[in-house]
Image (cartoon, rainbow, N blue to C red):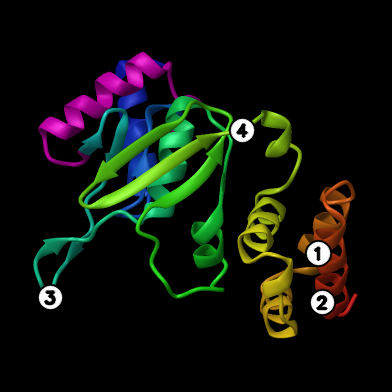
Amino acid sequence: MNSKGFSEELDKRLSETEEGTPIVASDFSDIANVRTIRELLNIRIRNGTIRRIMPGIYVIPKINELLNVEVPVTPGALAHAIARNHNWTIAPSEQTALNSLGLSTQVPATWKYISDGPYKTYELDGVVIQFKHTTNKNISSMSPTSKLIVHALKALGKDELTCETLGKIAARLTKEDAKKLVDDTSRTTSWIRDAIREIYKRCGI
């Protein structure tokens, strides 16, 4: 494929990308090498198709037509874009995990994630995202859903778990998610295993 072909394929993929979704060059590495993709993305920055919101992170602006302002990128989507850009594995932790599962309506002051990358903090438009380093084995062996639930349970703590909370978690899971959750957590702390067994029961399996 020549440079024109790369450009046309990138435009096709960008047209299929939801506005407001942060993207990184490696998202398109199946089209061309990352250097070429970055050059093509820079052209689209100049013509106004996309916007760079931080080094290596781009977005197709989403406009609120009523207010005529750009809709901010969601913290979770931004965190995962940063992770993709640096090839990190991440998982929500503490209040971030609870918020992501709908177990808390409190908006975190800082959106916290564990990561196999370095300790890093980023800020964009008043949103603070913090990555805390952990060993890869603590986050790489579980599915994203399993990681999210385990860290939400840790954030709540053993003494704060209620039947209502476990029911809410179960209601969000497919049968496949529930089975994978049990398999992924066979070596976790005993009280977390107990909670997950209860979640599994509530899934009606």
Badge 2 crowding class, 10 Å Cα cut-off, few under 14, some 14 to 19, many 20 or more, is some
Locate residue 204, reporting x and y percent: 87, 80
Residue 28 shows in this picture: no
* Mark toward the start of the polypeptide (4 vs 3): 3
**Numbered disc in front, either 4 or 2:** 4
Q: How far apart are marks 3 and 1 (CA)?
A: 41 Å
Give the residues drawn in magenta, as a range.
Answer: 27-51
| Front position in the image: 84 or 118 | 118
Helix, strand or loop status at disc 1: helix
* Mark toward the start of the polypeptide (3 vs 1): 3
Q: Locate the C terminus by quadrant.
A: bottom right
Give left or right: position of 154 versus 119. right
What residue sits right under mark 2 in the picture? 203
Taking the spot 46% from the left edge, 26% from the top edge, the residue there is: 86
The circle on residue 100 is none
Badge 4 crowding class, 10 Å Cα cut-off, few under 14, some 14 to 19, many 20 or more, is some
What residue sits right under mark 3 in the picture? 66
Helix, strand or loop status at disc 4: loop
The circle on residue 134 is 4
Q: Distance between the residues labelled 1 and 4?
A: 25 Å
Give left or right: position of 203 versus 69. right
**Numbered disc in front, either 4 or 3:** 4
Contact between labelled residues 2 and 4, with CB atoms less than 8 Å apart: no
Is residue 119 within the magenta segment?
no
Q: What residue type is labelled 2?
A: Cys
The circle on residue 178 is 1
Contact between labelled residues 2 and 3, with CB atoms less than 8 Å apart: no
Locate residue 177, reporting x and y percent: 76, 61
